[in-house]
Structure formats: structure tokens, C-alpha cells
């Protein structure tokens, strides 16, 4: 009796336990026991012609898909880039017994889908139509008619595609990264253009089909509501006429990293976001034991919403809608890369963050928590992928294509589990780089180029991966005037008051002249307000000497002595007024005009024109560095016996003397020649010897 | 005779089981939360989804973009979930999560290993009970949403839905699209965001739909524990706005960063539940369902004036837009395509489609329908969607009948009734280089 009451109570207790689930909101619930996901079974067989067939039976829904995949080496298409895709399209555009319109109608009538590409054909639909689908499939595969009319049509469509892609930032970026990592002469770097499409002939497509659509390099994958037995019988009948033939094999040398980091840019003037891609080539073939550690490293760095890139660039800084990293696995070469689309003004900051995160994962051991989370996340996504039986098929295909062990995918979770934090560090160092990285940006050069120059000298490309010139633009930034450009310049030099207080200067410079036996030495000196000297010597020989004192000037040299007059004299008297010539601009501001902001050698500069006569062309154009405020470059055109010659002087380096910045290295380009002027010594005020002017 | 009938019945039942009937259970909690459960043990995963009946059409004119903004904001955390931890829990459990917002609803989902079902319930109940609406989250997500908008609109032609809807609807909130106005997000106060949350994120305005490797009895208990105590709120009123007739064709030209000119047309549609909406969907398939469809065959294959054409009914709870897109082939212009498009529409109005064509589109519909329910995430979403907007979750098994009930005459009738000039917006997308204002500037 007691016993039965007990058991009654126990029953009740069990009942109430199951009826009243108690929860604790303050903590995440613990998981129950896990069920291991299973990879669907497959069977494979080979036809007499060498076609390898994989079948995954899946009778859950009355449908079927069949895909043919060619396993061939990559091909360089050269000046006909796009011809293999065209061949893929044209074979689906008519057979000996069916026009394109007939094919389309038959496929649509079954509610089926069908597609062909350079290295595949696939079809899918309800399994009640399996025979009809297979009939079309084999007809397209074995009897394409290559109709001229369809070829012309496809060519125009492909050209339309090229045009449409030329405005698509993702397509532009893909061209840019392919070219900058592999070069245009590589199967992974080739770019399709209107010209390459135009060069394709129908004959190219036919010979490609004849050479490569062969059973001995092909795999057929069938998934769905069909039995292996049925598949064998049906394929044996429909594809037995497909003839084998030796297929060309092609070899390529491995691509290596660039000697140093590069920054490449495609200008898209209308862009409001920059597409940033940072990455490098890697050598990681299918089946390599580094794949799992690198998957985990990538997961931690940028493999989704948990990744450091997403956390940093989106959730912390709100630079972007998403930032991710990625890598490829390929017999030849692939890349490790990180990318994001960010608003123009944070482009450089985002790159800095990318580099920081890459540096961190390459140098610091990841935490245990990071590695556990990454493993769970990856095994979870593996489990989810198995919801579709097509995963089992693609696993089987990879095992065959790449000669992987039969249990390669069954052991995937174990391999993942074995990865240690040290492995992650090792593969991060091996497959990611910060010193030989390529930074590829598609964006608005006007807004971003100046800041990007901080990462190195920018190489420009057009939308199709061809090198191009630095883009030209001139725009007026808000609130910038000639007065504040000059004000900033004086400030950057040391302050206008300080500049005005300077009384005298003398400097010795040397000029290297290409082809000349010796350096040219120059002494230039001034005493404010009425003495200027300029003397050029080579060795002990004086080449020329100009001396200005009290409103008069004389020039002496190897051709004797002459009096200086006219504009040249005016210029000298102007120079005598201030130690720094540009301070004198304030006395005649009306002769200057602020044109706008532009870009020179990747540097953002303000352009200021100088006029001697308002109705003429500017006699000189000056450029001031937007960031430092310093003078950067001046340009003028002079008449010469060979015609107009442009002379450009660029300040490459500055030096500080007595609290004031002076030019130190100046590069002058006159026509085809380049001189480098180095200011060796500078003396100021009382240190300037008045004997120089005697 | 009897035998024949028997045979037919057998064949019929065979056909039905071949279509993989989706079994499910559904019920309401006391607070009004609707629950739908579908059990399927083929893979050890489970999709936990929550559909809130709030989309951009529930927004005030001065608060556009709020619904979508909330889709971002509610991932910021809750009373028990620290900022940024929402994603963390799901990912480190081996799951995946995401959300999306339409004109009519906001949809959240977690796809989890089935032993983590309870985690999904906890997260969704936290989101519903007490999401964290804080300044830092608002400030961060506002910037993220701006980037989302920039990213989306940087794609060529991407502004077309906005450009169609703002002209197609004037009074109705379908006037704006879910991404909404950045200005509205910029100027909104924290209190306005809190009020929005309190108004719409209610059990009585949501459907919890779960599909996958689960035990129904046990799941019910857990659901009761996590959601049973969440207080019910005031009933959510759906907008009831009578949009006056469009009153004539509206045309506009958009200069975009594109090379190929494109013609984009939108016709006002009846509500998605109506018979006419189904007939229009069939009409869309006649026009562009596959390479043998009328519009594709005519413009892409025969005339070769278009590189690509697409017709799709963008149907919504209270209307929507029947959209036709045609992208000009290289060196062709809109005027080369438009007459053929008009002719194809007229033909649909003037003649019944052929029997063979009718059979073809029915087959296409059936094929799509049969193949549509293959993944747990999709099944959970469809069940919630059919319950919320069609009032019957079992539409997942029966909706095909709505298509089967459409006759050739119905297709002709809706073409006559809706695909008319007075009922449409026509957009000409042209390359920026053709913008006359740009010419003047240069």
C-alpha cells in the first residue's frame, strides 16, 4: 500500500515537473544532448566512355536535379576573354533537332530549369519528367548545332552584360583584384571587355566544345527522386554515344606575393561608398591540412557577425553595413582577403582597422573562448548544410576530383575539433600578410585618394583592369579661400609675424645635373629690404652671378657682365622685400586666384594661379598641401627653342632653422630633365655675412 | 466502372502524398501569441522564427524607416542579454540568425542545432519582453542603416522600387519603402523609438513559428514558460486608407550610374489575398516565366532590343505593384523596346492565352509550389506568413488551388482591369551622361 502511494506520488512529481518547466531568464539556457548530423549516402559508377556518375537518392520531394561538371585546367582566353562562357551559352541555344525556341518551350512546359556554362550543364524539375529532362540534357550535350544567328544574339547580350557590369562596383572590384593579384595574362586575372567579346568567333566556341566537352574529364551528379538502378539504366542509354578524347592539360606557375604592399584604385566619381578589398595570394590546395585551422582563423577574424572585422567596423565604429574576410581553396592559387563597403570619408580609417585586425590575428594567440565559439559556429554551419542533399553530392564530387580520402568529410568535424590556438596563429602568419598586401579600392578618388596615399603610391586602373592615369578633377571645397590657404601656409612655416621679422638669409645649395661631371653649387642670399645675391659655381668656376643692391642689378658670367632691367629687375626688387618670397603675395593678392582642390602625385592640394595680367593665362600655378598647409609645387611654362617647356618645382623635404621651416629638397623638372636641389646650409639674420654682397 | 474510380482515387492520393504535405500544430497563448509547430526529424536542426505584424506600412509619415530600424535595434540586447551578445549566443551555439523587414511585417529567425531550441526561445522572448532601447544602440545602428542604404543604392537601378512606389501610392503608406528616410531616423527621439517598440512588439501582434527536429509536447511547455508571462498589449490597428485611383499614367526619368537604359513600369495591384492577385501572378508568368514566355521571347530572342526582361508581381497585404522591367540591349534605347511591350500587354487583354500556354503556366506554378518547401527555415516562414496574411497556415498545403482556380478568362480580365495606362507608373532609367542638366554644368 505504502509502496503504491509512493509510486503514485512519484508519478505525480514527474508529471508536475514536466508540466511546469522552470526557466531562469538571466542566463542562456543550456543545450540538450546533441544529435550528430549525417551525410546522405551516395553511390557512384562509371560509364564505358569514362563518365563518372554520382547518385544521391532523396525521395522526400518528387523532384530531381542533374548536373554535369567538367574537370579541366584553367584556360587563358587572352584577347578573346569570354569565349569559353560564350561556348557554354551557345551549346544551350539549339541542337540538330531542336531550335532554341523549341528547347525553351519544352523546358518551360515542364516547369523545369536548365542552364549551360563553360564547364557545366544542369537541369532540374519534377521527377515525373526525368526522362524528358534527360532527353533534352543529352541532346544539348551531344548534338549542339551552333546556330550562327544565336551566336550573334549572344554576342550582343554579352556586350550588354559587359556594359552593365562596368557600373557595378562588385564587378569592377573583381576585375581590379584579379588583375592586381594575378595580372591580365593569367586565367584568374583576365578581364572580359567589349573588345574581347567582339573578337570571339563561332569557330572558337565549336573547337572549345570539341576539345573539352568529353566524358573522360566529366562528372555527372544526380540528386533526388530516382534510384541508382534507374539512373544507371537511363544514363547508359542516353549518354553512351558520348565519345572520349584526350583533353589538353595546361600548367601554370604559382603566383607569388608582391615585393612590398601595393595600393590600387579604380576611380568611380559617383561613388558614395568605397569598396575596400585587402588581400594576398595563397597556395592552398583541396585536402591540405591547413584548411581547418585557417577556417577557424578566418571565422574569428571576419567569418560573419561574430568576426572581429564585423564587431570592429560595423558594431563599434559603424563604418559599414558589413565587413568580412574570406579565402579560397584551389589547386593553383587563391586569395585570402577581407573586404567592406564603407562611406567615403572613413575609407582610410577602415583600411587602418583592417590592417590592425590582420596584425593582431597574425601576432597574438586567440583566446580559448574565440576558438570554442568558432568551432561551434563552423560545425553548426556544416550541420545546416546537410539539410540539403546536394551537400552530400558535392562532397562526393570533391573526393573524386581532388583524390581526397573517402572519409574526408565524415572526419571534418574531428579535424576541426583538433585545431589548437597555436595552429590558428601559425596559419594566420602563413596565409595572411600585412607587408606584401594588396589594398584594392573602388571609390571616388576626389574624396579618398589623398588620404589613401598615406598607404603608399597609388596605382590607378580603369574599370577593366587596365592601368590608367591619375584621375583629373578640380573642385571647390566648402569654406576654403585664398586668404586662409595663405594663412595656413604662413602658420605651417612658423607664423606670419616670425616670418616678417626675418632680416637676412643666406643659403648654400647643391644641384645634381644628370650627365654633368660635377655638382652645381648655388649661393643665394638676401638682406631685407634691398640686397639679393644669386651665384652659381661648378668647381672653382663661376657660371653666373646676379647681384641686386638698392634698386639696381648686374649679372656677370662667362659671357661678360650686363645690367639687369625690365621684369627681371622687378622680380629681384620684390624678392628683396621678404626672406620668404610668398610673404610678399599679401601685397598683391589681386594677382592670385584660388582655383580649387585637386590631386598631384596622390597628394590633395589647393591650386592657386598667379596672373601678371588678368586677361592672360596664368603665368604660374602653385599648389599647397591640403593636409600640412605647406607649399608643395609650382608650375610654369616657358618659351624655349624647342617650343613651350613646362617647368615644375616640387618641394620634397623641409628643414627647420631658427623655429622656421625652409625648403630642403626641391625637385625641378624642366622638359625632359630632372634636377634635384639640396639646400645644404641656411644662415639667418646676423649670421648672414654682408661681405657676400660686395 | 467502379474499378476505374478506385484507380483514379488511388492515383489522386498518390499524387497528394508525393507533394509532401506539411503537418503542423497551431494554437494561441493566453496573451495572444500565435504558435505554429512543424515536426521533421530528417536533420538535427530547428528553425525558430518570429513574425511581427509591423512593417513600413505601419509607420507614421514622419517616422519612415522605423520598422526596419527596429530590426537592427532589437539585436542590441535586452535586460538579460548584453549589448552585442545576441549574435554571440546564436553563433557560438552553432546557429545562424538574421531578420528582414517588408512593407507588411518584420521577420526574425534563428536556425539552430536542434538541441539548442530553447536558446532560440529565450532570445526571441527576451526580444519581445524587454529589448534594450538605449542611446548607444540607436546611434550605432542609425549609422549602420545609413551604410546599408548607401550600399544598396550604389547598385545600378537599385532605386526603382522606391521610385515606383512613391508615385504609385500617394495617401497609402506604401508610398515609401522599408528603408525609409534617414532624416526621420536622425530627428527621432529615444522616446519615439520606445513608443514604437511598446506599440508593436507584442505577443498579440506576433506569430512564433518553429519547424524542424523538435518534440511537440516538450516544445509547447517551453514556449509557455518563455512566452506565457509576456503581457498582452493593445490590439494593433492596421492602416485603413482608401487610396484614390491613380488618375492617369505617371512618367518620370531617372538618371543613374548605368550604361544600359531601362524601362521600369509598375501597375497598382489588388491585395495579395484576392483572386485578382492570383490571376495577375499567372499573367506575370505568361509574360516572363522562362525563356519561352511572351515578353522574353519577343524582346530578348526575336527583336533583340532587350538584354533582359522581368515581370514580377510585388504583391502586398493591401495592394502592391505589378512590376515590369526591361533592360535595353547594347546600343538599343527605351523607344526600341516599349512598343513591343505595349503590344504584348494588349494581346493579353485582347485574346485568351492558348490552351497549351495555359497548361504550361499551370505546370510552372505546380513545379514551383512542390519544390518550395524543402528547408525548415522556409517552412517556418511560410507557415507564419500564411497565418498572418491569409488567415490560414494550411495554405502551405493548399495555396496551389488558388492558382488552379484561375481561368484563362480571369487572366485576360485582370490584364484588362489592372494592366492599363491609367493605373501605372513608367520610369525611364537613363545613363547619367544623358542628363541635360549635367550637360549644362559642363
Image (cartoon, coloured by chain):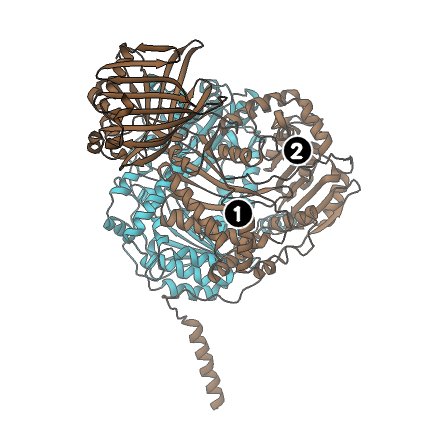
Chain colours: A brown, B cyan
Q: Which mark is residue A165?
A: none
Residue A400 in the image: x percent, y percent? Answer: 70, 48
Q: Nearer the viewer, residue A566 or A460?
A: A566
**SS category of the residue bearing label 2:** loop
Tell us which disc is closer to us: 2 or 1.
1
Residue B243 in the image: x percent, y percent? Answer: 30, 34
Q: Determine whether, in the image, residue B5 is placed left or right of residue A440.
A: right
From where the camera sits, is residue A47 visible?
yes
Q: In which quadrant will I find the C terminus of chain A?
A: top left
A602 to B74, vertically: above or below = above
Mark 2 neighbour class, 10 Å CA radius: few under 14, some 14 to 19, many 20 or more:
some
Q: Determine whether, in the image, residue A490 is placed left or right of residue B291.
A: left
Work out whether disc 2 and disc 1 sit on a shared chain.
Answer: yes
Residue A334 in the image: x percent, y percent? Answer: 58, 42
Which residue is at 27% across, 22% downward? A693
From where the camera sits, is residue B106 visible?
no
Q: Tell me the subunit letter for badge 1.
A: A
Q: Tell me the subunit letter for badge 2.
A: A
Q: Nearer the viewer, residue B166 or B279?
A: B166
Q: Nearer the viewer, residue B178 or A229?
A: B178
Earlier-in-chain disc, 2 versus 1: 2
Q: Which mark is residue A432?
A: 1
Which residue position holds label 2? A75
Q: Is disc 2 in contact with disc 1, using a CB cutoff of under 8 Å?
A: no
Residue B175 in the image: x percent, y percent? Answer: 32, 35
Query: Which residue in the rendered view is the most extreme toward the right?
Result: A48
Q: CA distance from mark 2 to mark 1?
A: 27 Å
Mark 1 neighbour class, 10 Å CA radius: few under 14, some 14 to 19, many 20 or more:
many
**SS category of the residue bearing label 1:** loop
Amino acid at each position: 500500500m505504502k509502496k503504491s502511494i509512493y509510486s503514485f506520488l512519484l508519478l505525480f512529481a514527474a508529471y508536475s515537473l514536466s508540466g511546469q518547466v522552470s526557466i531562469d531568464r538571466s542566463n542562456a539556457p543550456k543545450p540538450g544532448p546533441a544529435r550528430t548530423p549525417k551525410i546522405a549516402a551516395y553511390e557512384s559508377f562509371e560509364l564505358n566512355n569514362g563518365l563518372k556518375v554520382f547518385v544521391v537518392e532523396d525521395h522526400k520531394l518528387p523532384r530531381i536535379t542533374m548536373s554535369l561538371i567538367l574537370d579541366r585546367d584553367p584556360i587563358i582566353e587572352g584577347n578573346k576573354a569570354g569565349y569559353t562562357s560564350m561556348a557554354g551559352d551557345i551549346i544551350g541555344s539549339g541542337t540538330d533537332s531542336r531550335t532554341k525556341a523549341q528547347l525553351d518551350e519544352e523546358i518551360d512546359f515542364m516547369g523545369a530549369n536548365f542552364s549551360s556554362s563553360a564547364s557545366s550543364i544542369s537541369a532540374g524539375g519534377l521527377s515525373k519528367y526525368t526522362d524528358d529532362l534527360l532527353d533534352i540534357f543529352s541532346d544539348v550535350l551531344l548534338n549542339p548545332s551552333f546556330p550562327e544567328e544565336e551566336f550573334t544574339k549572344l554576342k550582343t547580350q554579352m556586350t550588354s552584360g559587359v556594359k552593365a557590369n562596368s557600373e557595378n562596383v562588385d564587378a569592377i572590384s573583381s576585375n581590379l583584384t584579379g588583375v592586381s593579384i594575378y595580372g591580365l595574362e593569367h586565367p584568374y586575372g583576365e578581364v572580359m571587355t567589349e573588345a574581347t567579346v567582339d573578337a570571339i568567333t563561332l569557330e572558337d566556341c565549336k573547337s572549345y566544345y570539341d576539345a573539352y566537352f568529353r566524358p573522360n574529364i566529366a562528372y555527372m551528379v544526380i540528386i533526388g527522386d530516382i534510384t541508382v538502378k534507374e539512373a544507371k539504366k537511363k544514363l547508359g542509354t542516353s549518354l553512351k554515344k558520348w565519345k572520349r578524347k584526350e583533353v589538353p592539360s595546361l600548367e601554370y606557375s604559382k603566383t607569388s606575393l608582391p615585393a612590398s604592399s601595393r595600393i590600387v584604385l579604380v576611380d568611380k566619381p559617383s561613388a558614395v561608398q568605397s569598396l575596400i578589398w585587402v588581400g594576398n595570394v595563397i597556395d592552398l590546395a583541396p585536402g591540405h591540412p591547413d584548411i581547418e585551422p585557417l577556417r577557424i582563423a578566418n571565422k574569428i577574424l571576419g567569418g560573419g557577425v561574430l568576426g572581429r572585422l564585423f564587431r570592429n567596423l560595423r558594431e563599434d565604429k559603424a563604418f559599414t553595413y558589413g565587413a568580412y574576410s574570406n579565402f579560397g581553396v584551389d589547386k593553383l592559387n587563391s586569395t585570402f582577403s577581407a573586404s567592406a563597403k564603407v562611406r567615403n570619408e572613413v575609407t582610410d580609417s577602415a583600411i587602418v582597422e583592417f590592417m590592425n585586425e590582420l596584425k593582431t590575428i597574425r601576432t597574438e594567440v586567440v583566446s580559448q573562448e574565440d576558438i570554442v565559439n568558432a568551432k561551434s559556429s563552423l560545425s553548426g554551419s556544416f550541420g545546416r548544410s546537410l539539410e540539403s542533399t546536394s551537400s552530400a553530392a558535392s562532397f562526393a564530387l570533391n573526393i573524386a576530383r581532388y583524390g581526397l580520402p573517402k572519409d574526408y568529410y565524415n572526419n571534418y568535424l574531428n579535424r576541426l575539433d583538433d585545431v589548437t590556438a597555436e595552429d590558428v596563429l601559425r596559419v594566420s602568419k602563413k596565409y595572411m600578410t600585412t607587408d606584401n598586401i594588396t589594398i584594392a579600392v573602388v571609390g571616388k578618388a576626389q574624396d579618398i585618394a589623398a588620404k589613401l596615399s598615406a598607404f603608399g603610391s597609388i596605382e590607378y586602373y580603369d574599370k577593366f583592369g587596365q592601368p590608367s592615369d591619375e584621375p583629373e578633377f578640380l573642385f571647390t571645397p566648402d569654406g576654403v579661400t585664398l586668404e586662409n590657404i595663405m594663412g595656413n601656409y604662413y602658420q605651417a612655416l612658423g607664423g606670419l609675424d616670425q616670418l616678417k621679422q626675418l632680416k637676412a638669409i643666406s643659403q648654400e645649395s647643391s644641384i645634381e645635373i644628370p650627365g654633368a661631371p660635377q655638382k652645381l653649387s648655388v649661393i643665394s642670399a638676401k638682406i631685407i629690404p634691398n640686397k639679393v645675391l644669386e651665384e652659381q659655381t661648378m668647381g672653382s668656376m663661376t657660371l653666373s652671378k646676379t647681384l641686386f643692391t638698392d634698386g639696381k642689378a648686374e649679372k656677370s658670367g662667362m659671357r661678360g657682365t650686363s645690367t639687369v632691367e625690365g621684369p627681371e629687375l622687378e622680380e629681384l626688387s620684390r624678392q628683396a622685400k621678404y626672406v620668404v618670397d610668398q610673404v610678399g603675395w599679401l601685397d598683391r593678392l589681386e594677382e592670385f586666384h584660388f582655383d580649387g582642390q585637386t590631386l598631384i602625385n596622390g597628394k590633395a592640394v589647393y591650386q592657386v594661379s598667379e596672373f601678371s595680367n588678368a586677361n592672360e593665362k596664368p603665368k604660374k600655378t602653385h599648389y599647397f598641401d591640403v593636409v600640412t598647409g605647406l607649399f608643395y609645387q609650382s608650375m610654369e611654362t616657358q618659351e624655349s627653342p624647342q617650343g613651350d617647356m613646362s617647368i615644375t618645382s616640387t618641394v620634397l623635404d623641409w628643414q627647420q632653422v631658427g623655429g622656421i621651416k625652409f625648403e630642403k629638397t626641391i625637385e625641378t623638372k624642366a622638359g625632359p630633365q630632372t634636377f634635384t636641389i639640396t639646400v645644404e646650409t641656411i644662415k639667418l639674420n646676423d649670421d648672414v655675412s654682408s661681405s657676400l654682397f660686395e | 466502372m467502379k474499378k476505374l474510380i478506385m484507380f483514379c482515387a488511388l492515383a489522386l492520393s498518390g499524387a497528394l502524398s508525393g507533394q509532401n504535405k506539411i503537418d503542423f500544430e497551431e494554437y494561441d497563448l493566453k496573451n495572444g501569441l500565435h504558435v505554429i509547430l512543424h515536426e521533421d526529424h530528417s536533420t538535427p536542426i530547428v528553425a525558430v522564427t518570429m513574425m511581427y505584424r509591423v512593417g513600413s506600412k505601419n509607420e507614421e509619415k514622419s517616422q519612415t524607416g522605423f520598422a526596419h530600424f527596429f530590426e537592427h535595434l532589437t539585436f542590441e540586447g535586452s535586460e538579460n542579454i548584453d549589448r552585442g551578445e545576441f549574435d554571440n549566443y546564436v553563433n557560438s551555439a552553432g546557429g545562424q540568425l538574421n531578420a528582414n523587414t517588408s512593407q507588411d511585417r518584420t521577420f526574425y529567425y534563428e536556425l539552430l542545432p536542434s538541441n539548442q531550441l530553447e536558446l532560440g526561445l529565450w532570445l526571441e522572448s527576451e526580444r519581445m519582453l524587454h529589448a534594450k532601447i538605449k542611446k548607444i544602440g540607436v546611434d550605432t545602428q542609425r549609422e549602420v542603416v545609413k551604410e546599408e542604404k548607401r550600399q544598396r543604392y550604389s547598385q545600378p537601378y537599385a532605386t526603382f522600387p522606391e521610385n515606383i512606389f512613391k508615385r504609385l501610392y500617394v495617401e497609402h503608406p506604401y508610398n515609401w519603402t522599408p528603408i525609409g528616410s534617414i532624416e526621420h531616423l536622425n530627428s527621432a527621439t529615444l522616446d519615439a523609438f520606445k513608443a514604437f517598440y511598446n506599440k508593436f512588439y507584442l505577443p498579440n501582434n506576433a506569430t512564433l513559428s518553429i519547424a524542424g527536429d523538435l518534440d511537440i509536447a516538450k516544445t509547447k511547455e517551453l514556449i509557455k514558460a518563455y512566452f506565457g508571462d509576456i503581457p498582452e498589449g493593445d490590439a494593433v490597428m492596421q492602416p485603413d486608407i482608401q487610396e484614390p485611383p491613380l488618375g492617369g499614367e505617371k512618367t518620370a526619368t531617372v538618371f543613374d550610374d548605368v550604361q544600359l537604359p531601362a524601362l521600369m513600369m509598375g501597375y497598382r495591384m489588388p491585395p495579395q489575398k484576392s483572386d485578382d492577385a492570383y490571376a495577375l501572378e499567372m499573367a506575370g508568368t505568361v509574360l516572363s516565366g522562362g525563356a519561352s514566355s511572351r515578353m522574353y521571347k519577343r524582346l530578348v530572342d526575336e527583336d533583340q532590343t532587350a538584354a533582359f526582361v522581368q515581370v514580377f508581381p510585388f504583391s502586398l497585404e493591401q495592394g502592391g505593384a505589378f512590376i515590369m522591367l526591361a533592360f535595353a540591349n547594347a546600343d538599343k534605347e527605351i523607344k526600341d523596346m516599349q512598343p513591343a511591350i505595349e503590344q504584348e500587354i494588349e494581346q493579353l487583354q485582347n485574346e485568351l492565352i492558348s490552351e497549351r500556354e495555359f497548361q504550361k503556366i499551370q505546370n510552372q506554378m505546380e513545379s514551383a509550389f512542390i519544390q518550395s518547401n524543402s528547408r525548415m527555415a522556409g517552412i517556418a516562414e511560410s507557415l507564419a506568413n500564411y497565418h498572418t496574411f491569409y488567415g490560414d497556415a494550411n495554405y502551405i498545403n493548399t495555396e496551389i488551388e488558388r492558382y488552379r482556380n484561375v481561368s484563362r478568362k480571369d487572366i485576360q480580365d485582370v490584364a484588362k482591369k489592372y494592366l492599363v495606362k491609367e493605373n501605372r507608373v513608367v520610369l525611364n532609367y537613363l545613363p547619367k551622361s544623358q542628363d541635360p542638366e549635367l550637360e549644362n554644368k559642363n
